[in-house]
Amino acid sequence: MNVVVCVKYVPDATGDRHFEADNTVDRVGVDGLLSELDEYAVEQALQIKEAGAGSEEVVVTVLSVGPEQATDAVRKALQMGADRGVHVRDEAIAGSDSLATSLVLAKAVEKIGSEAGWDVVVCGMASTDGSMGVVPAMLSERLGVPGVTLGSEVEVSQGEGGQVVRIRRDGDFSTQTVEGSLPLVLSVTDQSGEARYPSFKGIMAAKKKPMQTWALVDLGLDAGQVGLSAAWTAVQDSTARPPRSAGEIVADEDGSGAAALVDFLAAKKFI
Amino acid sequence: MSEVLVLVDHVEGQVTKPTFELLTIARRLGEPSAVFIGAPEAASVAAESLAEYGAEKIYTVDDTDTKDYLVTPKAEVLSGLVEKAAPAAVLIVSGGEGKEIAGRLAVKTGSGLITDAVDVRVDDGTPVTTQSVFAGNYTVQARVTRGTPIITVKPNSATPEKVPGAGIQEVFEATVSEVTKTATVTASESRKASGRPGLTEAAIVVSGGRGTGGNFEPVEQFADALGAAVGASRAAVDSGWYPHSFQVGQTGKTVSPQLYIANGISGAIQHRAGMQTSKTIVAVNKDDEAPIFELVDFGVVGDLHTVLPAATEQISRSRA
């Protein structure tokens, strides 16, 4: 079985994230890392690999589209236990919107699968920077396979017509059980299970794992199909939110805190 | 004037408040056309309220054959309607399913997509959206430059206005292809209602975090005294103290109420992402160094287990 896990290299959310002059996210001048929400995707891919061990060989390929430093995100996933890495890197990709990103990912998945096929593409629920959460659905649409998405619990089993992925999907009003047959796109939430840390052994082993770098031309794509100029949306303005002015802080030393709180709420006409 | 399609979010015909907000926003852009996907008997329940909030047209789509398939049939229905009506925009409520429908629709129709708008206005005849990004630290104005603007809008982005529309119903016979019938919903369990206001719709949200130590009673009782919704931080949810559907933050709900009261929540960036745009912010925390205090209009350094019950009692007494 061949599993592809898509990961994104994002600016560290605890750092100073900001925009460039052209209103694209600064991805180079800030500290970056593997998007936390994609760690859950890597974890589920590894669990699929471990569950399949013994009965069949499962190969987990990490796929990332991004600038030079995105190699760090791929390497982290290899350290966690993925088998091989693919980094799609091309200057023309900078500034791509979700539609172009999903196009590049779809072409890359097809290329990864061109030799031995592919069975499951695993994604996180959203990136921690753009946080649109639409790429898994777009990828499923582009690849023409089921989208079994936003899983908080994942199970792979043998169905009548082949292998089946079943998830628990928590909605606002109900909890659903959703399933689809391979090949498919699976996305998982941060409720799906704690992601493992790379072990020392994993870190050493990752250095020897195969890593490929592809450009657009390797995917049969043209620079005009991606990037900022081909984006179907345009940001015209980005402004930093003014800092909140410091409020009043009281200490509840002698039980006065509750009264002060109620007074504040009353003064603001909340009670 | 062009039509503006609004995908109706509903539970068995009971239309949700964010849908009415979208109808109000749609009126700024053109003529609101509601798209109702559900059982025919539910459609007649919904039609009245949709017209009340300005729907000129209501496309009804019978989902008897497709309701057990995830997301894709709805995207295909909308794609068919985009082709038929050539709308000025498609508006969908932001949320897990809404964004997935929007993403697929964008690919199908070759259109630009904007998610999580908190405002939509018209400039030069096209919609311009406002989004709050990077944990609410930046505000971004954007527009769609290709195809039909597809925009998902967060709940609470507009005040629903009752402006009666014609509400003319039209049955739309969608051709839903077999390829969309792949991700199957094999079971669905409704969650029981808490009796409190919905988290994303509430004017006041009272939430609890690690500092509750797993006891949400003081938080819930304070919320009830204020008529508020209850929220929880990720730490509280991960500890199993409160259900995930109440999580406020990056991987939960984004709320923007008039008043947000954080109790025993330190205020990590992931939590701030979900509440930073609240109008008034109050915190109760034992740790006077907690980053949440950088955000607050009013803060109490103290133990929520003593402060909240005392405040709750004082509020109830003043009302008695």
Image (cartoon, coloured by chain):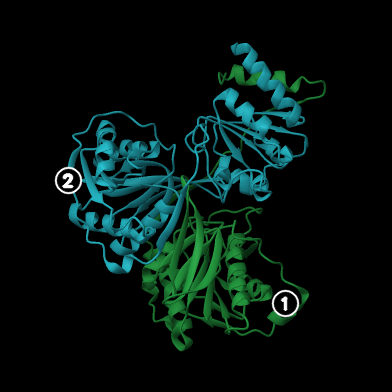
Q: Nearer the viewer, residue A225 or B26?
A: B26
Have a look at marks 2 and 1 and say if they share a chain: no
From what the image shows, is residue B123 above or below residue A39? above
Residue B303: % across, % down: 77, 31
Q: Is residue B67 left or right of residue A159?
A: left
Residue at the image position 60 percent from the left and 62 percent from the top: A35
* Residue named by callout 2: B170
Residue identifier under label 1: A202
Relative to residue B73, is residue B142 drawn left or right? right
| Residue occupying the point 77% across, 35% down | B288
| Residue A141 x, y percent position in the rendering | 37, 67
Residue B274 at x, y = what percent? 56, 44
Tell me the kind of residue under disc 1: Gly
Q: Secondary structure at mark 2?
A: strand
| Chain that the image shows in green | A
Badge 1 density bin: few <14, some 14–19, many ≥20, Cα 10 Å: some
Shown colour of chain B: cyan
Q: Quadrant of the C terminus of chain A?
A: top right
The image position of residue B64, as x and y in percent, is 28, 54
Label for residue A239? none
Residue that sits furthest to the right in the current view: A254
Q: Chain of mark 2?
A: B
Q: Nearer the viewer, residue B25 or A247?
A: B25
Q: Is residue B287 visible?
A: yes
Is residue A261 visible in the rendered structure shown here? no
Instruction: Kindly identify which chain the residue marked by label 1 belongs to.
Output: A
